[in-house]
Every structure is written in structure tokens, then in C-alpha cells.
Image (cartoon, rainbow, N blue to C red):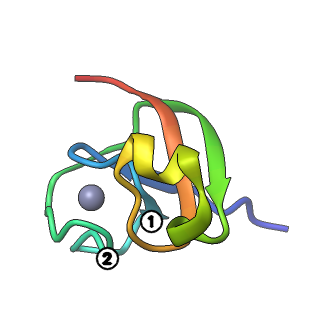
Amino acid sequence: MAKVQYKACRRCRYLVELDADKCPNCGSEEFTKLWRGYILIIDPARSLVAKKIDAKIPGAYAIKVAR
Ligand SMILES: [Zn+2]
């Protein structure tokens, strides 16, 4: 079974599949595969964590991203 890999948006850290070309959260087209850990945001409107990391849509966000 193939392992699905993700890359993280450099601007907002949203995780997308490797073939995505645009971040659905912030519209950035810059990604990095160098990221560690992630948090799941289920309901951005009600989540304090989502506000803190500027998450506007549900999904997984990397905790650490290489600059
Ligand atoms: Zn983004």
C-alpha cells in the first residue's frame, strides 16, 4: 500500500497532496516537503487554534515548516 505524502504551504502551513499547485486556504503557490507534525482543524470558525494559526478552512496544518 502506497503511503500518501503531503507538502505544506509555506505561508499558512496547510497540508496538501504533492500534486496540488495552489493552497486552498491562502492561495499561495509555494510549498515545502520539509515539515514536521500536524494539527487537524475540523471547525475553523469555532477553534481558537485555527484563529491562532490563521486557518480558514478545515484540514491538516503542519506544526513546523522549514523556511
Ligand atoms: Zn496556504
Query: Is the residue marked by circle 1 packed among few (<14), some (14-19), or many (20+) residues within 10 Å?
Result: many
Residue 64 image position (x, y, % from top left) = 46, 26
Residue at the spot of label 1: 16
Q: Residue at x 31, y 76 (%)?
A: 24
Quarter-of-image position of residue 65: top left
Query: Is the residue marked by circle 2 packed among few (<14), some (14-19), or many (20+) residues within 10 Å?
Result: some
Direction from residue 39 to residue 64 in the image, left or right? left
Q: Residue at x 42, y 64 (%)?
A: 18
Residue at the spot of label 2: 24
Quarter-of-image position of residue 26: bottom left
From the viewer's side, name the closer residue of 49 and 20.
49
Ligand 1 quarter of the rendering: bottom left
Q: Residue at x 30, y 49 (%)?
A: 12
Residue 20 image position (x, y, % from top left) = 33, 75
Label 2 CB less than 8 angstroms from ligand 1: yes
Direction from residue 49 to residue 16 in the image, left or right? left
